[in-house]
Image: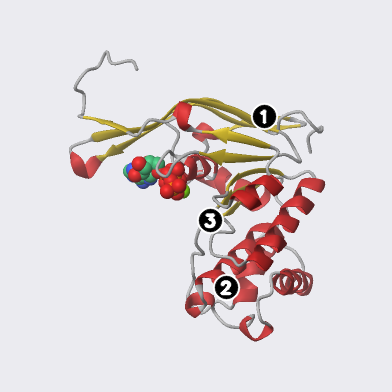
Amino acid sequence: MTAMNQPFLSVESLDKTFVLHGQDGLRLEVMRDLSLTLAPGECLVLAGRSGIGKSTLLKMLHGSYRVTGGRLRLHFEDGELDLADLPAHAWHQLRRDVIGYVSQFLRVVPRVPAVEVVMEPLLARGADAAEARGKAEALLARLNLPERLWSLPPGTFSGGEQQRVNIARGFIGEHPLLLLDEPTASLDAANRDVVVELIREAKARGTAMLGIFHDEDVRERVADRLLPLDRHMRARTRLPDTDPQETP
Ligand SMILES: Nc1ncnc2c1ncn2[C@@H]1O[C@H](COP(=O)(O)OP(=O)(O)OP(=O)(O)O)[C@@H](O)[C@H]1O
Ligand SMILES: [Mg+2]
């Protein structure tokens, strides 16, 4: 898709301010002037204290939060795409084909069995159902999810079991860009090892990854680079339109 070591993702001077409409338009500035690049096959780990804006950055890259300022670009061989102002249908296609995301918690859909939750990203691309099921089962087996659970909806699964379904769903699509929000947080050591392997395999096939890992051992095993967000973030509130000239 792109040549190795040319960036696949570039973030330039990204700003994010939440405007809390329920609170008289209170403004919460969480990010200012963040820049980074990410190449295919590279895993960049976001660091920094709780509330600094790590998940917020991933959510902007997945289109669930709007960008306040700056540029978020994907570089393809045949051109580039700015994510800051994409229409909804373009996001739908990007999430299907380009940007995968393992959220911190599985979003459970009632009555859908675990194996179907995992195969869904492939079916969305029109993959053969039997093949998709085979891949989903192989991933669930690698992640040590007991076979008796595969046909059950994950709503009643334990936290770690749900997270393994979530991880399988995130990795099955082999997206060129993968966002990982603490995928190993509720896993035991053996399953953390499986996730480390999955990440290394994804790297080897050229996946660009942006991840958050609180577990230092996992972080050391997967990170090519560490990006401390502290310099770019200040959880700072100010009242609406108090001082229009304010420039930090
Ligand atoms: N939808 C939202 N509306 C208002 N404020 C938000 C919203 N989402 C996040 N924030 C605020 O933005 C800041 C950054 O939150 P974020 O979840 O990105 O932190 P984080 O670095 O991922 O923290 P943690 O390590 O605890 O997961 C927090 O102060 C949070 O309250
Ligand atoms: Mg977070």
Q: Is residue 203 left or right of residue 169?
A: right
Quadrant position of residue 131: bottom right
Q: Amino acid at mark 3?
A: Ser
In the rendered image, residue 218, in percent from the top left (x then y), is placed at 65, 52
Q: Amino acid at mark 2?
A: Glu
Q: Amino acid at mark 1?
A: Glu
Residue on which the image places disc 1: 80
Instruction: Locate the N terminus and report the quarter of the image it occupies.
Output: top right
Residue at 65%, 75% (x, y): give it: 115
Of badges 1 and 3, the one in the foreground is: 3
Count of labels in the image: 3
Quadrant position of residue 146: bottom right
Of badges 2 and 3, the one in the foreground is: 2
The circle on residue 201 is: none
* SS of the residue under disc 1: strand
Q: Examine the rendered structure and indicate whether residue 166 appears above or below residue 15.
A: below
The circle on residue 103 is: 3
| Crowdedness near tag 1: few (<14), some (14–19) or many (≥20) residues, C-alpha within 10 Å | few
Return the residue found at the far bottom: 148
Residue on which the image places disc 2: 161
Res 36 seen here: yes
Q: Disc 1 versus disc 3: distance between alpha carbons?
A: 26 Å
Q: How is the image coloured?
A: secondary structure
In the rendered image, residue 104, in percent from the top left (x then y), is placed at 51, 57
* SS of the residue under disc 3: loop
The residue nearer to you, when weighing 20 against 95, is 20
Q: Earlier in the sequence, mark 2 or mark 3?
A: 3
Residue at 71%, 63% (x, y): give it: 194
In the rendered image, residue 49, in percent from the top left (x then y), is placed at 44, 41
Instruction: Locate the C terminus and report the quarter of the image it occupies.
Output: top left
